[in-house]
Image (cartoon, rainbow, N blue to C red):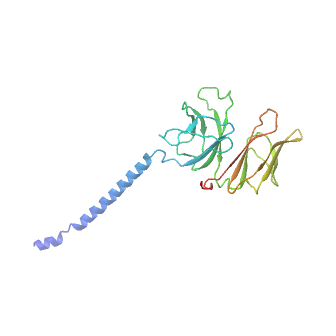
Amino acid sequence: MAHALGHLIRFRPVARRVSAGTNFVRHLFLGFLACLSAAAQPGASYPLVRFTVFAAKAPADLAFVPKPGAAPQKLQFYPTARSPRYDYRGPVPLRIIDSTTGQSVAEVAIPPGAGEFLLLLTPVAPAAASGVGTLRYHVAVIDDGALRHGPGGLAILNLSGLELRGSVGKEPVTLQSGLNPAITLAGATKVALSSVYKGRTYPAYGGTVTLKRNERALLLLFPPFYQGSLEAQSRLLIDYPPGLAPAKR
């Protein structure tokens, strides 16, 4: 009789089912904890944005907060080149602050998603910036990725307010306001631009661009220094697209 009952009562299949269910719940719980841990990391929910900065007149004591909860990081400006690249994981707009007071001096509307950008700072007119808490800089956001502006290319950003036309090497150009498509250069290339006023043509910019292997150039054209002048102020920034800079020896 005991032998018969032992044959009928089996516990192992039940044990296996309980074990499998326990493992499932355990893995589900561990996965939930992993998600909570990732979400708890400052900036984890924001895409990575890399950017450089430039200003015709380099400002001092500017900074930004690279991710929520982090200490402010100072921005370094160069007179004739882009800054070092900075990483940002945070909300939009990105706020540039005065590192001495913590006051916001510029707000940057970065396009959605990750990317590489050049932030071009221009000062707000003194009359507009006189109020307490008023932003002190306009910021132009330029797509600075290698696909948009690759090695061997010259891109021209026309902020001069002038209607400009001329040539880049042998190629005729008519510049639009803002960023113009990059032009591939072959060796040292002469750039000549002019503006027309009352039927007469006046030189607005002239120069020669020479690039080394894998370098690229961005020509910035600003409004004339003197009122009534047709000669644009300029800065030529030469660097390497992201990921193409030669290894330092």
- Residue 103: image x %, image y %? 56, 31
Q: Residue at x 49, y 38 (%)?
A: 71
Nearer to the camera, 70 or 39: 70
Nearer to the camera, 141 or 13: 141
* Horizontal arrangement in the rendering, residue 234 relative to residue 195 (left or right): left
- Residue 90: image x %, image y %? 52, 43
User: Which quarter of the figure has residue 139?
Assistant: top right
Q: Residue at x 20, y 68 (%)?
A: 10
- Residue 233: image x %, image y %? 76, 39
Q: Note whether residue 181 is visible.
A: no
Q: Residue furthest right?
A: 199
Quarter of the image for the C terminus: give it. Answer: bottom right
Quarter of the image for the N terminus: give it. Answer: bottom left
Nearer to the camera, 121 or 134: 121
Q: Residue at x 59, y 34 (%)?
A: 61
Q: How many marks?
A: 0
* Horizontal arrangement in the rendering, residue 71 relative to residue 4 (left or right): right
Q: Residue furthest left?
A: 1
Q: Residue at x 69, y 52 (%)?
A: 216
Q: Note whether residue 83 is visible.
A: yes
Tell me: residue 101, above or below residue 233.
above
Q: Residue furthest front?
A: 249
